Amino acid sequence: MQQEAGRAGALLTIDLKALRANYRFLQSRLSSAQCGAAVKADAYGLGAIPVSKALVAEGCRHLFVAQLEEAISLRAHIAHDVNIYVMHGSPVGYEAEFIEYGCTPVLNSLEQISAWRALAKERMSLLPAIIQIDTGMARMGLSHAELRTWLNDFSITEGIDLRYVMSHLACAEDQLDPMNQLQLQAFNNLLTQLSQHYSDVKASFSNSSGIFLGSDFHFDLARPGAALYGVAPVAGQESPMQSVVQLQGRIIQTREIPMGASVGYSKTWRATQPSRIATVSVGYADGWLRSLSNCGVAHIAGVEVPMVGNVSMDTITLNVSHVDPQLLYPGALVDLICPDNTVDQVAKQAGTIGYEILTSLGPRYQRHYID
């Protein structure tokens, strides 16, 4: 392990203890509702298998992925008493694989409902599913017209064991956005109509940010994702979540440059005085976004240093003129994501969101898990 970490150009440390603490904190906010977890996109780039195992050990029994392949890969490592839900539903013609691998689809259209119902009839058994409703995001789930079809003919779900009805919030990170209340009202209206036919239908509505909108949004099952991994759940407020990720790049070499010398492609930065430049083995091929050119920062022994020049495919360059030269040896680690430069701060520098920073973290990083 040490030898491999030493060879890698950068080290990504995932703190599973902090992850588990974040899960407990979110569960404590939910009172009677259950806390699931979104582990799609390889657990937002942090490793779906180790992350899911840590969450299951903490009591999580509902894992959400986006695609069937993700569910199949994960199921081999997760006990069958833990539910794995596939939010995109089934690829056409692959419904039977959900039974084979013990996964549950989220049905988003009448076509998906019809295919799942047909399989239930063929197998002569009830098949579990979640049905998603679009309450205003216009992305996935039954449209208003499809919903009317369902409410007018409940027989279209015969053979389906309806575990949850779910929808997804569009603006939950902004607690004052009126869209939140409009979606909540639409969702409650739907549940009232469904209760006339389904006696004990359960509901799932809140993502990470939705948990912080209050108990009216909690229902039976929440599906946090980014907050578990340390991303701030409420815009403009100090994050209550613990940092889960530390990213460190290795110095390849340093050089002294004279005043007026340029650094990197396209000469986007010039030294206004003699400067010391460190080249670090991280680039946009590793998911360190090119938009961080000339605006990102790093830390060396607690000293903030600016990123200068354009981000290259495999390297970045830092102005380390004010850092003790003894700390700048080849192989020395530079902090790129750390408590002094969180995922959310990096995202702000890059002009994006923490989700993109996490999910962009590349495969060349040596991943190290601590607990």
Image (cartoon, helix red, strand yellow):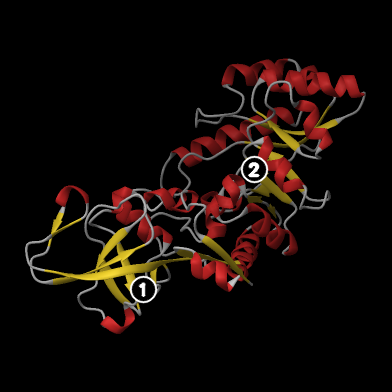
Residue 309 percent location from the top left of the image: 22, 56
For the N terminus, the quadrant is bottom right
In percent of the image, x 60 and y 34: which residue is there? Answer: 187
The mark tally for this picture is 2
Q: Which residue is mark 2?
A: 65
- Element at label 2: strand
Measured Cα–Cα span from mark 2 to mark 1: 40 Å
Residue kind at label 2, given as amino acid type: Val
For the C terminus, the quadrant is bottom right
Q: Which residue is mark 1?
A: 330
In percent of the image, x 49 and y 41: which residue is there? Answer: 180
For residue 179, above or below residue 28: above
Foreground pick, 120 / 4: 4
Indicate left or right for 128 with 214 as reference. Answer: right
Residue kind at label 1, given as amino acid type: Pro
Indicate left or right for 248 with 31 as reference. Answer: left
Indicate left or right for 280 with 356 as reference. Answer: left
Can residue 134 be seen in this snapshot?
Answer: yes
Residue 221 percent location from the top left of the image: 68, 48
For residue 76, above or below residue 134: below
Foreground pick, 230 / 102: 102
In percent of the image, x 34 and y 57: which residue is there? Answer: 315
For residue 17, above or below residue 158: below
Foreground pick, 94 / 349: 94
Can residue 240 be seen in this snapshot?
Answer: no
